[in-house]
Image: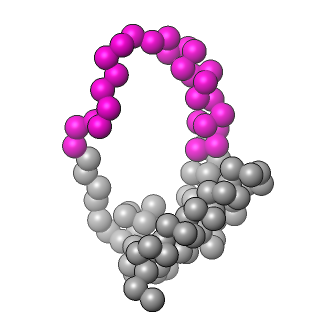
């Protein structure tokens, strides 16, 4: 969201992890279902935000303030973690 808003692009190289063993994709889907649902829920909330800031940290703060996080302990912790994380990159 922020990269698009600021007119940048993100390019990623080779995967950091290679899965070499066979696994059951249906079991994996069952295990990951709640995470996929949470990700889609959060993505929809992020998509609704209109960013106005002109730098990465300010845009990130805007997301923290403007995203209407779903109820639940996970999202409460996520918001707090986002607030802590962005403070590491602030100059003031």
| Image quarter of residue 47 | bottom right
58 versus 78 height, above or below:
below
Of the 4 image quadrants, the one containing the N terminus is bottom left
Asked if residue 38 is among those painted magenta in the image, a careful observer would answer: yes
Q: Nearer the viewer, residue 15 or 80?
A: 80
The residue sitting at 50% across, 11% down in the picture is 24
Quadrant into which the C terminus falls? bottom left
Task: Left or right? Give the position of 7 relative to 34.
Answer: left
Q: Residue furthest bottom?
A: 92
Q: Residue at x 36, y 71 (%)?
A: 6
Instruction: Give the image location of residue 83, x and y in percent.
Output: 57, 70
Q: Position of residue 28 (x, y in %)?
A: 54, 20
| Residue span colored magenta | 13-39
Q: Residue at horizontal 61%, vertical 37%?
A: 35
Residue 67 as seen in the image, left or right of residue 82: right
Asked whether residue 91 is drawn in magenta, I would say no
**Corner quadrant of residue 38:** top right
**Residue 50 in view of the camera:** no
């Amino acid at each position: 969201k922020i990269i698009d808003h600021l007119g940048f692009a993100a390019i990623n190289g080779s995967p950091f992890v290679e899965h070499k063993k066979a696994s059951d994709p249906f079991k994996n889907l069952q295990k990951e279902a709640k995470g996929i649902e949470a990700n889609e829920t959060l993505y929809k909330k992020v998509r609704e935000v209109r960013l106005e800031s002109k730098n990465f940290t300010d845009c990130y703060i805007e997301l923290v303030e403007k995203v209407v996080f779903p109820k639940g302990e996970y999202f409460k912790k996520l918001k707090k973690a986002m607030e802590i994380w962005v403070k590491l990159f602030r100059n003031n």
